[in-house]
Amino acid sequence: MSELSSKQRSFLRSMCNTLPTILYIGKDGITENTCQAAWDALEARELIKCAVQKGCPLSAREACQELCEKVYAEPVQCIGNRFSIYRKCREKEPKIQLP
């Protein structure tokens, strides 16, 4: 996947403000089930917000990086214990039109 430009990343960050957190990473860290849930969510939405819970052995930045590598996504932002990732899924009908 190609890197996002700063303009595209900024556009996606603005969209993240209203997104609900749909994926939580807990005490087991990033498991196969977590990766599958992230993959399915990215297929459906293209942009998702995740959170790292208190018992997680990873920081939010580490979890974001690891999850992005496993599901072939791009990190959008990481603030506190939350992060957002993006993956363009549909070549013919993308849900999000990047500038």
Image: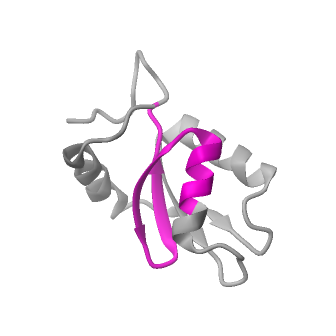
Q: Is residue 86 magenta?
A: yes
Colour mapping: one colour
- Residue 72, quarter of picture: top right
As displayed, is residue 28 above or below residue 19? below
As displayed, is residue 91 above or below residue 17? above
Residue situated furthest top in the rendering: 92
- Residue at coordinates 22% horizontally, 49% vertically from top-left? 6
For the C terminus, the image quarter is: top left
Q: Position of residue 82 (x, y in %)?
A: 49, 70
| Magenta extent | 64-88
- Residue at coordinates 52% horizontally, 76% vertically from top-left? 81
Left or right relative to 13: residue 42: right
Instruction: Please say whether residue 22 is visible from this viewpoint.
Output: no
Left or right relative to 25: residue 14: left
Q: How many marks?
A: 0
Q: Position of residue 95 (x, y in %)?
A: 39, 32
For the N terminus, the image quarter is: top left
Q: Is residue 36 magenta?
A: no
Out of 69 and 97, give the one closest to the viewer. 69
Left or right relative to 79: residue 98: left
Q: Position of residue 73 (x, y in %)?
A: 51, 42
- Residue at coordinates 70% horizontally, 48% vertically from top-left? 35
As displayed, is residue 43 above or below residue 23? above
- Residue 18, quarter of picture: bottom left
Instruction: Please say whether residue 11 is visible from this viewpoint.
Output: yes
Left or right relative to 21: residue 67: right
As displayed, is residue 36 above or below residue 99? below
- Residue at coordinates 79% horizontally, 49% vertically from top-left? 32
Q: Position of residue 24 (x, y in %)?
A: 65, 66
